[in-house]
Image (tube, helix red, strand yellow):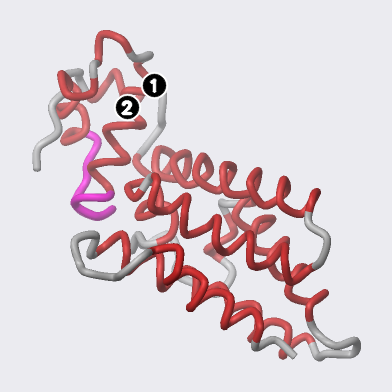
């Protein structure tokens, strides 16, 4: 689907926001490799030079979008942790919110968590340019650690943390990718997948 500047109400949006909104849709629909600054410029009806006034290259633009998504998730995580009465309750709420926010803004979720790029080539490269993503991951990891028995090994904590994240992410990715499939009530599905995964932590 082609995105036209008029669809984005370009006359009412600040230019940088217009660029980000259009780029998010293009990345989500076509993937990182298939989006160029020239294609983005054509989409919003400006010259490539105009975009380069705001972003030095596609990488910086993409990382700006991921940072925006991670900031919103991190804010939600921090709010949950500040009011939760137990680590397990907090963890369930965080993962439920993860799914909910992904469904509320599927393009942002695709760009932030489902995008194949050449930026993540090594074990540490995923967080190299995304400190907010690392902080978000560490918050969840710390919450998982508090749910586990004292003396649990770092390996067990890591595997358990990645397991519950995989449950939430896998569910979100499926719901985002196949929105018209008959999944049943989403809230019930979230409880079945996420709560079962968290309750299995012993």
Image x and y of residue 200, in percent = 65, 88
Disc number for residue 19: 2
Nearest the eye: 99 or 12: 99
Nearest the eye: 168 or 135: 168
> Quarter of the image containing the C terminus?
bottom right
Q: Is 127 placed above or below 58 here?
A: below
Image x and y of residue 146, in percent = 82, 74
Q: Is mark 1 on a helix, strand or loop?
A: helix
Residue 72: name its quadrant.
top right
Q: What element carries label 2?
A: helix
Residue 90 seen in the current view: yes
Nearest the eye: 150 or 57: 150
Q: Which residue sits at x=47%, y=69%?
A: 190
Do tag 1 and tag 2 residues touch (Cβ < 8 Å)?
Answer: yes
Q: Which residue sits at x=34%, y=50%?
A: 106
The crowd level at tag 2 (other Cα within 10 Å; few <14, some 14-19, many 20+) is many
Disc number for residue 16: 1
The crowd level at tag 1 (other Cα within 10 Å; few <14, some 14-19, many 20+) is some
Q: How far apart are marks 1 and 2 (CA)?
A: 5 Å
Image x and y of residue 186, in percent = 39, 63
User: What is the residue that sits farthest to the top in this orientation?
Assistant: 11
User: What is the residue that sits farthest to the left in this orientation?
Assistant: 1
Question: Residue 146: within the magenta?
Answer: no
Q: Is 184 placed above or below 73 here?
A: below
Q: What stretch is highlighted in magenta?
A: 28-37
């Amino acid at each position: 689907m082609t995105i036209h500047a008029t669809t984005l109400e370009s006359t009412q949006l600040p230019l940088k926001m217009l660029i980000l909104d259009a780029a998010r849709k293009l990345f989500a629909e076509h993937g990182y490799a298939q989006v160029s600054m020239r294609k983005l410029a054509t989409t919003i009806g400006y010259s490539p030079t105009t975009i380069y006034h705001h972003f030095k290259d596609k990488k910086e633009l993409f990382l700006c979008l991921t940072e925006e998504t991670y900031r919103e998730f991190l804010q939600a995580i921090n709010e949950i942790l500040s009011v939760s009465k137990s680590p397990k309750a907090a963890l369930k709420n965080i993962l439920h919110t993860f799914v909910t926010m992904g469904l509320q803004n599927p393009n942002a979720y695709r760009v932030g968590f489902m995008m194949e790029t050449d930026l993540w080539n090594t074990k540490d490269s995923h967080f190299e340019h995304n400190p907010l993503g690392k902080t978000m991951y560490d918050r969840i990891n710390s919450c998982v650690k508090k749910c586990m028995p004292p003396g649990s090994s770092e390996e067990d904590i890591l595997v358990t943390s990645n397991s519950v994240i995989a449950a939430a992410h896998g569910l979100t990715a499926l719901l985002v990718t196949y929105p018209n499939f008959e999944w049943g009530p989403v809230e019930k599905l979230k409880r079945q997948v996420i709560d079962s995964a968290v309750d299995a932590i012993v």
